[in-house]
Amino acid sequence: MRIRQSLVVLLLTFIMQISFAHRCERIVTLSPALTTIIDEMGLAENLVGHSEYSLLPKGLNSVEVGSYFNLNLEQLYRLKPTMIFLEQSDAGKTVAKMKKLGLPAQTILLNTLDEIEASYANISAACGFSPDDLTGEKALVKTDLSVQKNRLTDQGNGLVFYGDGRDYKLDVPTLAVGKSFHRDLFNYLGLTLLYDGPLNAPTLNSEALFALNPDWIIILNSDSAANYDTLEQLTVRNIEVKWPRLEGVNAVKNGQVYELKGYWSMMPTPRAMESIAEQVITVLDQSESPNSIDKQKENIQ
């Protein structure tokens, strides 16, 4: 009986390996986020093509195939991919052309936190195996984030802004986080964002910011100079802002303005979500530094 069971396990493993080799032996990713997710899953060695702006391990033999909206279809075809992963569902003519060429394409949505959490499982299903069959980083973000759910419920109301690389000590950010995976993540942690409307990135001027009067402000500032060796670096610092017209705002008055900087701050991948959550908790969870807000600021400077 044991010999028979062992043979069955070996047969199933062999079938799984054949399926994997057929479907995802040669992968092309058409967004930097999907390139990073493939790497997080331990499948980087199967990459034969990637989109521009992707950060790859050194020595990886993968060819840039352009961008999602400016795709080199001839080059893509020559790579003979067994699976192409797209981030957007409305690829339109591009997907139609790929299908006409007989190229296999699979859409992986990354617009919400739930979709990001499911990305490992969805990619695994497209390849024909279970995430547990992978080596390296394979735990879904939902497992990692579950202990952080509603961790921050007594921090008042805040605002999160998208930065553009500048130093915001003097400049006031205007592009707020709206309906996005970032808002999903902050809500998941138990935080309340003062803008809860339908826009993805609404513009809030100084008057609007003053009227909303947030208790804390976080600026997400991507690092345009990031490379593969630094893509996982995510730093947080308190900014002693000089915003004369906003000195009465609670966040400014109490020194609760923070910058979260790094490539991962804007990247919709499971590990990036986990890292952002950890950094936000570090600066906003009062239980992390029981003495005072001032003591908390000293710890992160």
Image (spheres, rainbow, N blue to C red):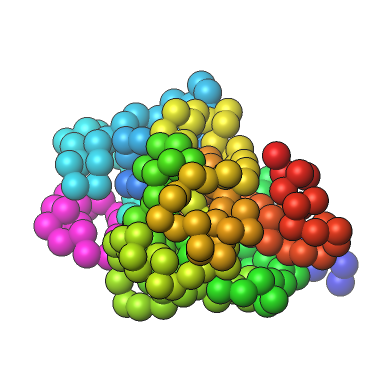
Regarding residue 199, the answer to whether it shows in the image is yes
x and y percentages locating residue 148 in the rendered image: 71, 69
The N terminus lies in which quarter of the figure?
bottom right
Q: Nearer the viewer, residue 113 or 1?
A: 113
Q: Is residue 99 magenta?
A: yes
Residue 77 visible at all: no
At horizontal 41% and vertical 66% (from top left) the residue drawn is: 210
Tell me the quarter of the image containing the C terminus: top right
How many numbered marks does the figure carry?
A: 0
Indicate whether residue 160 is drawn in magenta: no
Q: In the figure, 171 relative to 245: above or below?
A: above
* Residue at image location 66% in from the left, 52% down from the top: 279
* Residue 162, image x, y percentages: 41, 53
**Within the image, what quadrant is residue 206 found in?**
bottom left
- On screen, residue 140 above or below 36: below
Span shown in magenta: 87-105
Query: Measured from the top left, where is residue 260 in percent x and y?
Result: 55, 47
Residue beneath the point at 15% across and 61% down: 92
Q: Is residue 107 left or right of residue 114?
A: left
Front-most of residues 46 and 268:
268
Asked if residue 24 is positioned above or below residue 76 in the image, the reply reads below
Q: Name the residue located 48 percent from the left edge and 70 percent from the top edge.
A: 213
